[in-house]
Amino acid sequence: MNASIPAIAPKGTNGAPSGVIDTYPSTDPDCWWSASQCTTPKASGVKPDIAAMPEPRTLGYGFDDGPNCSHNAFYDYLNSKQQKATMFYIGSSVMIWPLQAQRAVADGHEICVHTWSHRSMTAFTNEQAFGELWYTMQAIKLVTGYTPTCWRPPLGDVDDRIRYIAQQLGLDTVLWKYDVFDWEANDPSVTPPVTPQDVQANYDKVIAAATSGTFNTTGAIMLAHELNNYTMQTAIDNYPKLAAAFDHLVPVGVGYNKTQPYVETNYSQPTFQACEFLALNLFSSIPVTFGPLHRPPLIVLLRRFPSYRRPKLTIPIFADVAARGGSVAGPPPSSSGAGAKPSGTSGSNTKSSGSGSGAQTTGSGAGVTLRVSGLTLVLAFIGALALVL
């Protein structure tokens, strides 16, 4: 592969930009997004970036910089709205918070690569850039059972050399045209400072553009983050307005009819046309299909069904969930000291009830107590049998 990589020099060292952008030619020979927002490569044989949605009045809904230990309330909210998204995961974070990554797959979100260390990709050597992508793919495969086929460069920093390396790994490059800059809010290193009011104004611009007909021919992809409690709560606050302004909010892959988002063929998601036919924001009535080797774990099956009567079932094998400060079944106990959790209203150190989760985790050490219904137990038993058949 090395001999075929476009002969473009790294624009920095070890992921740190060198300032070459100040002297970079205005002709943009490398299709360097950081310099020109170029998305159509100039090197032969390199695929164009995905930067917009092909369907009108459609938003490619997604979030960068996950997973993290406090995103359960946010994912509960998305579940309550039957909404799926594209999650761009940092490889090192996947290894730190594997249960959260597993939950994303079990919930039906599309997972893409967001590099291992979240640094400027054009400032790496060929070998370093390869490692940033390949090790993240392996981490996601190890934790979830699936190998992504898409990626997003941190800060959008990509040129034809990096695109080619990603392409050889089977990764489509996904960028954006609209940025709410939530990741810069309240960051003292950002000049001029970005305030929450600025972020809300950026959301409002996208919503106003959708309402005014800007996306009547071609849809949009917007950059937002599950970086921290603030960015996730802001996403929750703006979700109803985005859903009202756009006809469809879908993962990027669904908008491109990418029914198999992973290398493994035992997982599928619906086409855009199927979602449109059902007039849903996303495929709540068309379940994501898991293969026999990668079905959701039992704890995920338990949370799929709403509870009616709630006898207690203690499963000691999940005792480490509380100790780790997270769970695919719900937010960690408030006594765990894991920190603030976003919720539909506000507040730190709160537990989100979610909608239709049907299971909560409590306690620590000896076991995790799950409150489930009789129907849930029957369905979970059937699901458990399926895991071993």
Image: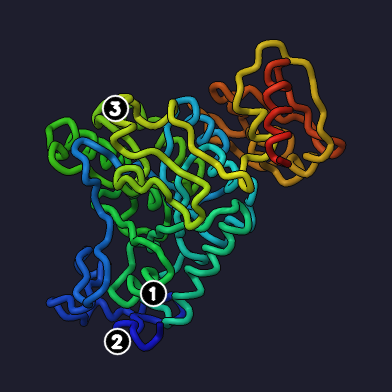
Residue nearest the observer in this picture, 249 or 331: 249
Residue drawn at the location 43% of the way across and 41% of the way down: 269
Q: Which residue is mark 2?
A: 7
2 or 3: tag closer to the N-terminus: 2
Locate residue 102 relative to residue 90 in the image: left or right.
right
How crowded is the residue under tag 1: few (<14 C-alpha within 10 Å), some, or many (20+)? many
Find residue 150 and report its horizontal and vertical position in percent: 40, 58
* 72 up-or-down from 96: above or below: above
1 or 2: tag closer to the N-terminus: 2
Task: Please tell me whether mark 2 or mark 3 is closer to you in this view.
Answer: 3
Query: Dividing the picture into quarters, in which one does residue 19 lie?
Result: bottom left
Residue nearest the observer in this picture, 330 or 47: 47
Marks 3/1: CA distance?
37 Å
Residue drawn at the location 51% of the way across and 69% of the way down: 134
* 348 up-or-down from 54: above or below: above
* Marking on residue 165: 1
Residue type highlighted by circle 1? Ile
Give the SS element for disc 1.
helix
Q: Which residue is mark 3?
A: 277
Find residue 257 and report its horizontal and vertical position in percent: 32, 45
Residue nearest the observer in this picture, 356 or 337: 356
Query: Dividing the picture into quarters, in which one does residue 362 lie?
Result: top right
- Where the C terminus falls, by quadrant? top right
